[in-house]
Amino acid sequence: MKRLELLIIILTIGLLTANAQNERKFIRSGNKLFMEAVKDTSKIDTTKFSKAETEYRKALNKKPGNNKWDFNLADALYKQMRFDQAEQKFTDLTEKLETPEEEARSLHNLGNSQLMQKKIDESIESYKKALRKNPDDLDTKYNLAYAQKLKQQQQQQQKQQNKNEQQNKDQNKDQQNQDQQDKQNDQDKQNDQNKNNKDQQQQKNRQNQQDQQNKQQQQQQPQNKISKQDAEQLLQALQNDEKDIQDKVKKQKAARAKKMKVEKEW
């Protein structure tokens, strides 16, 4: 980015009052400090620019509203990299300066202050306004082209960022779908396993129930059916019991008959 416009005030010699001499003394001192700082291209001498600012403010305290001194003050703020304050100063000055050349210089420096704050769109607009006031200013044309190039790079970066974000979004969506599908597959497998386990348990329960029924039938079978030998023994016992009963009956009949006979003899 090229030059920052500076208005070095050329002082005329004449009959001045004591106050006017003091004001110009501050301006001369500020300009001297400013030019010494500008000559040192190896570094930015913020100390001298700060002292120049102090001198300009002293002059403005004596005589407020001097646009040329305000312009130099705004330049000193810019050189101290206090870009937001410089921007405000140049914005105010642009509305007060009288000639197109002065307005163009103020707009040029306004664009620089905005560009240093990465306000690219605002700086482009300020450079365009400056060129409307002074179309032949090559430095403003250069700075405008530089700002437009930065704008293009910014758009490309934003486009690439949006593309990357979309790709990441699509990848995340695909991953989510895959995770959901894997989860569903796992759930289906688990459901199948649970169903198989349930079927196996039911089959096992039926088998246990069948075994239990068979066991009960086996336990009941001896009670309902006896062997041939047991049956013969049981029949023999019944026959013996029946014979005993018959013998007892005969003896009882014989006893009653004898009794009756005796009674009759009496």
Image (cartoon, rainbow, N blue to C red):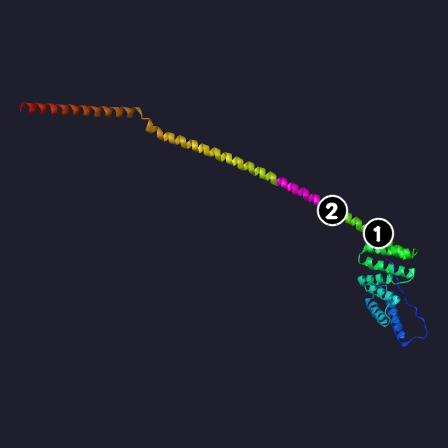
Q: Is residue 59 above or below residue 198?
A: below
Mark 2 and mark 1: Cα distance apart in space: 22 Å
Does residue 196 appear left or right of residue 143 in this picture? left
Q: Look at the image and say whether residue 179 sits in the magenta stretch.
A: yes
The one of 175 and 24 positioned closer to us in this rendering = 24
Q: Secondary structure at mark 2?
A: helix
Identify the image quadrant of residue 259. Answer: top left
Q: Position of residue 182 (x, y in %)?
A: 62, 40
Q: Position of residue 62 (x, y in %)?
A: 86, 72
Majority secondary structure in the magenta region: helix
Q: Residue furthest left?
A: 266
Q: Residue at x 61, y 39 (%)?
A: 184
Identify the image quadrant of residue 124. Answer: bottom right
Q: Quadrant of the N terminus?
A: bottom right
Q: Is residue 43 visible?
A: no
Q: Secondary structure at mark 1?
A: helix
Q: Residue at x 35, y 30 (%)?
A: 220
Q: Position of residue 120 (x, y in %)?
A: 82, 55
Which segment is the magenta one? 169-182
According to the picture, the residue beneath numbered tag 1 turns out to be 149
Q: Position of residue 89 (x, y in %)?
A: 83, 63
